[in-house]
Image (spheres, rainbow, N blue to C red):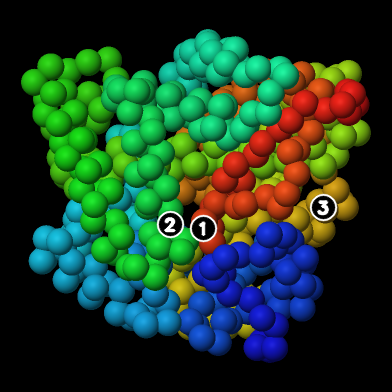
Amino acid sequence: MSQRFDFDPVRIPQPADPYPLYRRLREEHPLYQVSESGVYCLSRHRDISFALRHPEIFSSEAMRTVLMSPDQTRVKWRDFPTLARFLFQARVNPLRMSDRRKGLVESDPPEHDALRSIVNRGFTPRRIGEWELRAKEIVSQCMSRIDEDQPFDVMQELAIPLPVTVIAEMLGVEPDRKQDFKRWGDAVVAASTGQGREAGLAALLAPMGELRAYLRGVIRSRQQQPAHDLISVLLERRSEGALDEEQLFGFIMLLLIAGNETTTNLIGNTTLALLAHPEQLDLLHREPHHLPALVEEALRYDSPVQSLFRQTTREVEVSGGTIPAGAPVALLMGSANRDDEIYHDPDRFDVTRNSPGHLAFGFGVHFCLGASLARLEAKVALEALIPALRNRRAAGGATEWVDSFTVRGPRALWLEPAPSPIV
């Protein structure tokens, strides 16, 4: 396990194009340990799939300890739980990360299974299917505000408002607060996986305090007068004793923040890929039945979530090397989805490709709860956006990416009228 290769999964900022680095990792260092932080990196599809299939070996506890770290260089891995307990006991952390009960993304079976069985009620195929018509209405409203003779930002005009509005309405909170939801979400992403980590948890105090106060008011309202929304469903299921107050807050925050980021960045990344591959855009104009395959190929080709973190519960052998017990592990899904052991010519964007087994939504017990909703929203958005791309081009300049080492997507994506149709 040579340390000559310079890669760090929590480096900020990440490379604008990480895929050549991923290829080198897969070929030369499939099990790579970062010398400074001690994090082990897995980059091959088969190894990451193994880790996701075995939560008893690769614990999701790391999703709390890694993202709670204000600075990998100042606070060592073994200190993270102590830091979280201190903040909880001092009651200065608005997230109130209890050491007793964990949320959905950082828990392991059987606790995770109990939580998942509760929240799954809001994400059945029937319930998700019921949102298709509403998603189309939202997209139509977004597209109607775009002037065909003026530049527009795909992210602000479509990719952000669509999932924010759907999640807000699903939960039963005011869609008019979407700017606040986005601001709170950006703060969490930046403070946990972006430049804001330098400021530590202090950067989260104000935005998370605001979000918690807002949600407390919504929850009290639903307790007094239940409605036909997901918060009311979750409150009803609390009577079964499986969700405490912190987990309820945590799950609602997860939906408002993570539920928006994935779809927003999926739409942005897909748009970028289509603009960079005009022959694929032309194919979609002629053969729109490839749209579902486009969504899957975009998820594979440029995954909105590039990495997850796990912690080993025992010593384990992977790719000819050994990871000790208690070690932090980065699972590089962005790399796994370009693995040529699984995909022919993986760096080629092909909307006709059959993309089985991509890991953009994870795998196993932690497979993304909102995957079907993200797919539906992306399909509806792209169905309306693709015709508009015929007479548009990127406005120029380098893409500014979301401030995060795990979330990948353009912060803004301005399109301007093309002198003539580009396809």
Q: Position of residue 178 (x, y in %)?
A: 38, 30
Quickly name the residue at label 1: 404
Q: Is residue 328 left or right of residue 151?
A: left
Earlier in the chain: of badge 3 and badge 2, it is: 2
- Relative to 127, is 398 above or below? below
Distance (Cα) linking label 2 and label 1: 6 Å
The answer to whether residue 86 shows anywhere in this view is: yes
The secondary element bearing badge 3 is classed as loop
Earlier in the chain: of badge 3 and badge 1, it is: 3
- Relative to 402, is 245 above or below? above
* Image quarter in which the N terminus is found: bottom right
Earlier in the chain: of badge 2 and badge 1, it is: 2
Determine the residue positioned at 11% across, 29% down: 220
Determine the residue positioned at 50% across, 83% down: 38
Q: Is residue 205 left or right of residue 147?
A: left
Q: Is residue 9 left or right of residue 416?
A: left
Q: Nearer the viewer, residue 406 or 343?
A: 406
Q: Could you say which quadrant of the image residue 379 lies in?
A: top right
Quickly name the residue at label 3: 346
Disc 3 residue type (three-letter):
Pro
The secondary element bearing badge 2 is classed as helix
* Image quarter in which the C terminus is found: top right
The secondary element bearing badge 1 is classed as loop
Disc 2 residue type (three-letter):
Ala
Quickly name the residue at label 2: 190
Q: Residues within 10 Å of mark 2 (few under 14, many from 20)?
A: many
Disc 1 residue type (three-letter):
Ser
